[in-house]
Image (tube, helix red, strand yellow):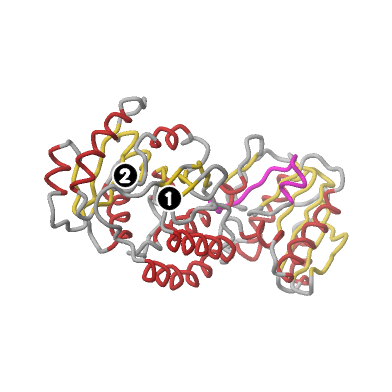
């Protein structure tokens, strides 16, 4: 597998390719990486394919229609660790490939951004206004950090786009990629760049059609972004505008901190993207959902992908085990309780939450050798039970 693939979606771009491909080649010679250029042809009627092949690019015939079809074809067919997509009309300066590639270790997606500090776009005022409005609307509705959501000049790590199951054939695929990448816990960074007018031909994007396509995609992307399965769901709920979700997350947070006190050896099972990990940096987070852990990763943070019924820790390793809404989601809750007990020191505290009746949970805890020492309701929807490990716990 090569290190870097330059991907050029093309439709009747022969005149631009004659000048662009040699420029890209020259830029790639200054990058210490194995690389190739791929032209994704969308059914050109000029000499695009012949020019691309003559100048040493690999030509792949696009499956599906539109810009989204070209991007999906590239993601499926091009084997490279990094894929860099750019326009073939000189609006994306080829030397900027180096800028994006140099930042490859900072995030899984690097966007050449017109709207971040020191970015700029030389566009017709109407197109610039529409682009700006759409970016502001999408950024706020979808709670995305990036400022330029419609830039097609991007560097992707293969692992971030390999299994996104993209659906859109239109330019809305650009927002779809970002939303689905965010939902999988991948990081996105921006590099300021200046967008330039195309040299030859006319743009294939039409302003009114462009806006309608984006707005049609907005609702379905909003639903996906706000799913509890999204990698950052708990974090966004903690800081978000929805008062119910915010209150629920923050009350769980406060109750957990009161339980932990000044203890130092903490295990948080089913941690997700909970802010408890930030408030209790000495804790170890465990979750079966890898994308949640990916979102919460930090250089010094301890995160482990494991199940509640097979915890990879020695006996009596922790003073406190937190398991909020875990038992109701495992097939064998008794085995999970056995693992919690095994990992707790004698007299250690198990802090477990349930969305169902707490009487059954208390009986289960007592049968497992725990002494229930406290309980607290969270907004009337769940109960947090505090239990102490007895000398004869399982």
Which quadrant of the rendered structure holds the N terminus?
Answer: top left
Nearer to the camera, 111 or 343:
111
Quarter assignment of residue 241: bottom right
Left or right, residue 216 beside residue 339: left
Q: Earlier in the sequence, mark 2 or mark 1?
A: 2
* Residue under label 2: 90
Q: Is residue 199 above or below residue 387?
A: above
Residue 389: percent from left, percent from top: 81, 51
Which residue is located at x 49 percent, y 47 percent?
Answer: 120
Quarter assignment of residue 99: top left
Left or right, residue 181 beside residue 280: left
**Disc 2 residue crowd, few under 14, some 14–19, many 20+, Cα 10 Å:** some
Magenta span contains residue 269: no
Q: Is residue 84 above or below residue 209?
A: above
In this rendering, the label closer to the viewer, 2 or 1 = 1
Magenta span contains residue 284: yes
Left or right, residue 354 beside residue 9: right
In the image, which disc is placed on residue 122? 1
In the image, which disc is placed on residue 155? none
Nearer to the camera, 3 or 122:
122
Label 1 near label 2: C-beta < 8 Å?
no
Residue 228: percent from left, percent from top: 59, 65
Which residue is located at x 36 percent, y 42 percent?
Answer: 84
Helix, strand or loop under label 2: loop
Left or right, residue 233 beside residue 371: left
Residue 261: percent from left, percent from top: 86, 47
Helix, strand or loop under label 1: loop
Which residues lie in the magenta part? 276-291
């Amino acid at each position: 597998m090569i290190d870097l693939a330059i991907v050029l979606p093309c439709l009747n771009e022969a005149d631009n390719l004659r000048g662009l491909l040699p420029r890209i080649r020259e830029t790639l010679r200054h990058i210490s990486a194995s690389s190739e250029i791929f032209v994704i042809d969308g059914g050109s009627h000029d000499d695009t394919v012949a020019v691309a092949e003559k100048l040493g690019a690999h030509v792949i015939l696009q499956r599906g229609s539109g810009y989204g079809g070209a991007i999906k074809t590239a993601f499926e067919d091009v084997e490279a660790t990094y894929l860099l997509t750019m326009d073939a009309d000189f609006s994306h300066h080829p030397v900027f490939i180096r800028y994006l590639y140099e930042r490859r270790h900072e995030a899984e997606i690097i966007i050449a951004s017109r709207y971040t500090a020191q970015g700029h776009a030389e566009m017709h005022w109407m197109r610039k206004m529409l682009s700006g409005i759409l970016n502001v609307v999408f950024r706020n509705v979808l709670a995305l950090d990036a400022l330029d959501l419609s830039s097609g000049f991007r560097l992707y790590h293969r692992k971030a786009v390999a299994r996104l199951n993209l659906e859109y054939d239109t330019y809305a695929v650009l927002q779809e990629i970002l939303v689905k990448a965010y939902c999988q816990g991948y990081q996105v960074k921006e590099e300021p760049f200046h967008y330039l007018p195309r040299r030859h031909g006319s743009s294939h994007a039409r302003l009114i059609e462009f806006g309608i396509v984006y707005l049609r995609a907005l609702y379905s992307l909003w639903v996906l972004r706000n799913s509890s399965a999204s990698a950052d769901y708990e974090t966004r709920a903690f800081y978000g505008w929805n008062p119910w979700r915010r209150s629920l997350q923050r009350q769980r947070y406060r109750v957990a901190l009161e339980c932990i006190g000044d203890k130092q050896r903490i295990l948080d099972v089913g941690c997700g993207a909970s802010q408890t990990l930030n408030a209790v940096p000495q804790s170890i987070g465990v979750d079966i959902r890898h994308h949640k852990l990916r979102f919460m990763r930090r250089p010094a943070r301890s995160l482990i992908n494991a199940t509640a019924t097979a915890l990879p820790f020695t006996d009596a390793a922790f003073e406190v085990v937190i398991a909020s809404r875990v038992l109701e989601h495992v097939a064998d809750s008794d085995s999970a309780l056995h693992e919690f007990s095994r990992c707790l020191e004698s007299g250690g505290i198990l802090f477990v939450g349930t969305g169902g009746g707490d009487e059954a949970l208390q009986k289960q805890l007592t049968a497992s050798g725990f002494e229930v020492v406290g309980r607290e309701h969270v907004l009337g929807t769940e109960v947090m039970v505090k239990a102490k490990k007895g000398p004869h716990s399982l």
